[in-house]
Amino acid sequence: MTSRFALIALAVLLAACSAAPAPEPAPSAAPAVTADAAPAAAPTASVPAVSAPADADDAQAWLLGTWELSYDPDNSPKDLLVFADGGALQIQDAQGVKAYDGRWSLSGSTLSMAFQVNGREVAFDATVSPARDRITNESGAYYTRVP
C-alpha cells in the first residue's frame, strides 16, 4: 500500500519500533540581528519542516478547501485533505473526522505536505495537475476538489 494513510501507518510503526531517538537537525547559523530589527515570531505549528506561505495569494488560493480521495490503485478507504490559509492542513476520514494536523507548501506543481505522527515527521510530495483539478501522489492515487 502506498497511499498516504499507509505512509503514515508505516511511520507510526517505525516510530514505535525504533529504539534510537530521531536525530536533531544540524544547527544553522543565525542571521545577524540589528538593533532596529523586529524579533522573529514564534512558530505556531508543531510541524516545522515544510514552510508554509505567509498567506495564500491568488496563485495558491485555488488550493484552499476540501479535496477527497477519488481514485486509489490500492483501494484505500476514502479520506479528505482540507487545505487552509497560512499553510494549515488536516487529513480527515470520509466522515470528516480529523485524523492528523499538518502543514503544506506549494512550489510550481509540487505540493509538499508534512504531519507529526507519534512525535515523528511524515512528509511527502504530490503533483498538482496543470488544470489544478487533481492532486496525485506517487502511487497514482489522486484527490479532486469537493464541490
Image: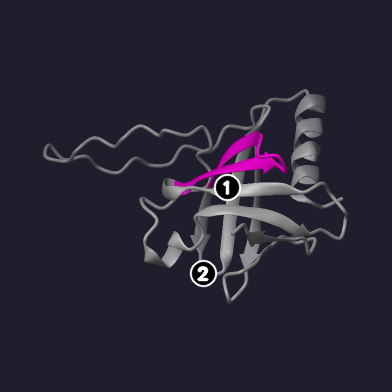
> Where residue 96 appears, x then y in whole percent?
65, 39
**Residue at 51% across / 69% down in the picture?**
108
Q: Residue beneath label 1, please? A: 82
Q: Residues within 10 Å of mark 2 (few under 14, many from 20)?
A: few
- Principal secondary structure, stretch drawn in magenta: strand
Q: What residue appears at the point 64 percent right and 27 percent down from the top-left corner? A: 119
Tell me, yes or no, whether the highlighted magenta stretch contains residue 112.
Answer: no
Compared across the picture, whether 70 is left or right of 37 comes to: right
Locate residue 146, reporting x and y percent: 62, 57
Residue most toward the bottom? 130
Disc 1 from disc 2: Cα separation:
20 Å
Callout 1 amino acid: Val
* Residue occupying the far front of the picture: 147
Mark 2 lies on residue: 108
Amino acid type at circle 2 is Gly
- State whether residue 2 is above or below residue 73: above
Q: Is residue 144 above or below residue 91?
A: below
